[in-house]
Image (spheres, grey):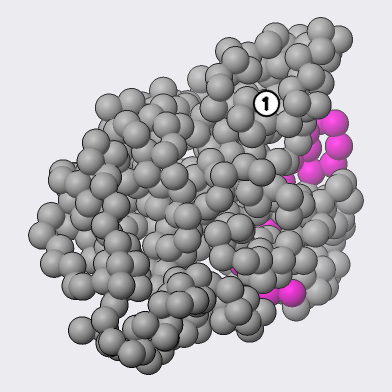
Amino acid sequence: MLLLPDFVGLYFESMSLLSLQKMRFCVGVIVPILLGIGGVAAAQNQGIASPGNNGQALVGATIIDGSGRPPIENATLYIRNGRIEAVGKRVKLPAGVQRIDANGKTIIPGLISAHSHVNDASQFGIYLRDGVTTILSLGGNKEFALRDQAAKAPPGTAPHLYVAGPIQDSTAIPGAVAVKDPEGARKSVDELTDNKPDIVKLRVDDFLGARAKMSPDVYAAIIDEARKNGFRTAAHIVLLDDAKGVLRAGVDYIAHSVRDREVDAEFIGLMKARHVFYCPTFTREVAIFAYSETPAFFSDPFFLKEADSAEIAKMADPKHQETVRNDSAAQWYKQQFPVAMHNLKAVSDAGIDIVMGTDSGGGPGRFQGYFEHLELEYETKAGLTPMQALVSATSAPAKLLHISDRTGTLEKGKWADFVILSANPLDDIRNTRKIDSVWIGGVRVPAKQ
Ligand SMILES: [Zn+2]
């Protein structure tokens, strides 16, 4: 039997991680919705839980829990108070649970992107409706404010947002701060870490000779100062030698593919020695060279559902496409793409944790939400299995973000963040786009307005 005070108590217990503002919203809006205004009195009078008061159960689904374990067929996912209460073949449901038929559906954890860029709160819904429930936004000037906005947003309207804040770079390009010497780097990191970034991002890239590259003494100072302050570091690199340099300096996360050469045993050894994560961001490359023509995905209805039409028009403009065709940098990235693909497979085969990331939102034509699905497809083109691709977008990035106790897999006690698909992504990874509904914290994400 479920008594009202217990229910309310449990509900607030589950809210303890959330901000006060969110809690106020919950008190005012969610609790009455969950209970039903009239249901409060009825439940108090009769001591009976009406359907839905005791959570919801998705029954009959194929469940891929994100751990890499085989799927569970004909299974139940029972959620209550924003969390997963039980998952498996033989889940005993108490009274008052709303049963939702999920026969023929596949349920996967909410996707986690370990490298995207959220630039505005208006983009929260795009990611969410496309099934991306957790994001590491890896560098930008507005990220700390956006993280606050996401935390305060009404349930079901914002992803769990983790951020790097301004990128430590050699040049003050948008989203970055310039650090010129080790002393300046330490000062810059001290200022940055006052805002408690979820990771410190640095960029080691001369843009194929177009500008100065951060020197090893500067990035060593950034990585060292971050660690002294209790923070981990993520590096943007392009070249194998720079990747090895930041690894020797103690970086925790290689946030792009190595693109100039095939990775070697030394690189693999450095990655494994300190359990460093690797993110290929193939779709970042695609966004640089693919708009030399109109890409096939421009006619994908799933793409068109969320993609900004002005941005589509820009990328489809013949003048822009001609510029891309004649751009030597774009052509270099295109030529090196097979190297990046090879390197993902090599790094994965070596047992290094791969995390899905796209750089979506980080430049022109990098379509948020859609690119996360396209990235999974490229991961499988590079030789990962659909299951490995799913792990790279669920449990692996949760490990990177140190949030495995909260999300990344469909297991008891974790946030009820999941995507219901109408087809199984293990049959074809592109089935992650066949979204029936998206849930975050047990709340169904509303359709596009
Ligand atoms: Zn980026």
Mark count: 1
Query: Which quadrant is the C terminus positioned in?
Result: top right
Report helix, strand or loop for mark 1: helix
Q: Quadrant of residue 387?
A: top left
Give residue 268's position: percent from left, percent from top. Answer: 42, 44
Q: Where is residue 148 in the image (x, y as percent from the top left)?
A: 71, 70
Taking the spot 13% from the left edge, 55% from the top edge, the residue there is 89
**Spot occupied by residue 318 in the image (x, y as percentages of width and height):** 81, 7
* Quadrant of the rendering where the N terminus is positioned: bottom left
Q: Is residue 361 magenta?
A: no
Residue located at (50% from left, 70% from top): 33
What residue is shown at x 68% (from left), y 57% (from top)? Answer: 201
Relative to the observer, which residue lies in front, 310 or 267? 310
Circle 1 is placed at which residue position? 287
Instruction: Look at the image and give the residue range highlighted in magenta.
Output: 195-213
- Closer to the camera, 376 or 211? 376
